[in-house]
Image (spheres, rainbow, N blue to C red):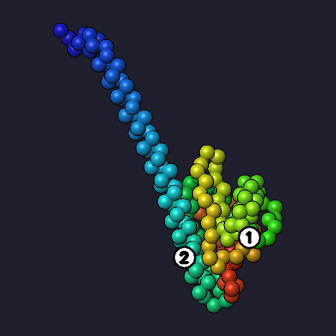
Amino acid sequence: MNTRAQLFSHPLMAIFALIVIALLLLVGYQSIKNLSVLSATVETKTFTVQFNKAVQEVYTEPPGSSREIHFSIPPGLMAVCFIDLHNDLPALPYQEIYDVADILKHNAQLDLNVFFVVSAGEKKPDPFAIKHLQPTQSFCTDIQNGQLSVVLENKGRSVSVTSV
């Protein structure tokens, strides 16, 4: 008997094989998708650690010292916003920053000063606080070619951040 006839002689086995193949493809797709999300999360965390370290280094330098810094930013992030929640927000190009700021002010979480704007469909990282960072004015800087460039300046009691 030929093998084709044997396969069709057991239709339940063929259906089972198709279901197993479909499940393997689905699990593989989900694993790759989760790995991509995890990679972006790790890159964002790396940015936060490096940025915090740069601010603390500038803070320990003499007042008036400044440094231009560049960071790699993970894909999916459109902008990084430096916000002073103690003051009213100026005109910013991203409405979602106002929404988050209102919630944080209502919950008295005024120490958060770095916010992210993400592309549609991307997971938004939580805002975070950098000790000693005090933006001279709240602003957002767009990500250009996966890079963020800002100037940090020691103001004596704090470090200011401005866009390049």
Helix, strand, or loop for circle 2? helix
Question: For this rendering, which residue is in front, 148 or 58?
Answer: 58
- State the mark number for residue 84: 1
Query: Tag 1: residue type?
Result: Asp
Q: Nearer the viewer, mark 2 or mark 1?
A: 1
Q: Mark 2 points at which residue?
A: 53
Q: Residues within 10 Å of mark 2 (few under 14, many from 20)?
A: few
Provide residue 49's location: percent of width, then percent of height.
Answer: 53, 70
The residue at the point 76 percent across, 59 percent down is: 102
Look at the image and tell me in which quarter the C terminus lies.
bottom right
The mark that comes first in sequence, 2 or 1, is 2
Look at the image and tell me in which quarter the N terminus lies.
top left
Above or below, comparing residue 118 to residue 69 in the picture: above
Decide if residue 103 is on the left or right side of residue 10.
right
Q: Residues within 10 Å of mark 1 (few under 14, many from 20)?
A: many
Provide residue 150's location: percent of width, then percent of height.
Answer: 65, 71
- The alpha-carbon separation of the residues under discs 2 and 1 comes to 20 Å
Are the residues flagged by discs 2 and 1 in contact, CB closer than 8 Å? no
Helix, strand, or loop for circle 1? loop
The residue at the point 74 percent across, 55 percent down is: 99
Decide if residue 16 is on the left or right side of residue 62.
left
Question: For this rendering, which residue is in front, 162 or 117?
Answer: 117
Residue 80 position by quadrant: bottom right
